Structure formats: structure tokens, C-alpha cells
Image (tube, rainbow, N blue to C red):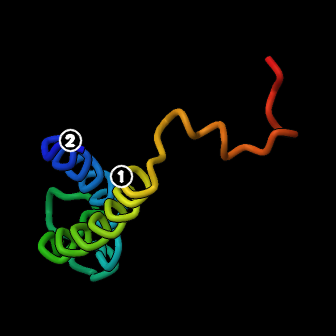
Amino acid sequence: MAWFTIVAIYFVLWWLVLFAVMPFGVRTQSEDGEVTLGTVRSAPSRPHFAKAAFRTTIVSAVLFAGFYWLVVVKGYGFADIPSFIPQEFRSNA
């Protein structure tokens, strides 16, 4: 696998994980009881982007390591996906 492919896959994975990790640990302005004028009540009162970015990096690294192990070490690819389905559940088309 080329280095550019590794960077591209990690970049896409990082962004996907970021949006999954961002809501954890965030309190809204209405939960804190201090709604700033001109903002919605559901806006975060203290967004912790650095903490979310750190968590995202850790989770993405673990997921990418699993992906790399499956693709490079074990040699799985898109052509191997049908082999995960047992024969009795496959269509004979």
C-alpha cells in the first residue's frame, strides 16, 4: 500500500471518527444555565476541540491499525467480501 493511500485513508477515517466523538462530554448552554444571547440553547457551552481531536486520533489509529492488518497482513480486499457470507445464504444469480 502506497504512503499516499495510507494518508488518504487515515484522513477520511479521522474525519468520520471526529463527528462520532465530538458530542461525548460536551454540555449544552441550557444544561449549564447560561445561554448566550443570539445563540441556540443546544450550543456547547465549553467545546473541548483539543480533547475531541486527541480522542479522535487515538480511535482512528486503532481502527486504521485493524484495517491495515486486514488488508496488508491478511490480504483481504473487496473481492473477498462475498466469501464472508456462508454459501447457503448466497443467491445463485
Q: Residue at x 16, y 49 (%)?
A: 7
- The answer to whether 48 appears left or right of 68 in the picture is left
Type of the residue with mark 2: Thr
Q: Which type of secondary structure does the marked residue at label 2 adopt?
A: helix
Which residue occupies the foreground of this view, 41 or 7? 7
Q: Is residue 12 above or below residue 62?
A: above
Q: Residue 67 location, x and y as percent? A: 39, 56
Q: Quadrant of residue 59?
A: bottom left
Q: Residue at x 87, y 39 (%)?
A: 88
Which residue corresponds to mark 1?
Answer: 72
Which residue occupies the foreground of this view, 30 or 83? 83
Marks 2 and 1 sit apart, C-alpha to C-alpha, by 12 Å
Which residue corresponds to mark 2?
Answer: 5
Near mark 2 (Cα within 10 A), the count class, few <14, some 14-19 or many ≥20, is few
Q: Residue 4 location, x and y as percent? A: 13, 42
Q: Residue at x 27, y 82 (%)?
A: 32
Between label 2 and label 1, give the one nearer the viewer.
1
Which residue occupies the foreground of this view, 61 or 3? 3
Q: In the image, which disc is placed on residue 48?
A: none
Near mark 1 (Cα within 10 A), the count class, few <14, some 14-19 or many ≥20, is few
Type of the residue with mark 1: Val
Q: Residue 87 location, x and y as percent? A: 81, 39
- The answer to whether 84 appears left or right of 38 in the picture is right
Q: Residue furthest top?
A: 93
Q: Quadrant of residue 26?
A: bottom left
- The answer to whether 89 appears left or right of 23 in the picture is right
Q: Residue 37 location, x and y as percent? A: 14, 63
The quarter of the rendered structure image containing the C terminus is top right
Which residue occupies the foreground of this view, 15 or 81? 81
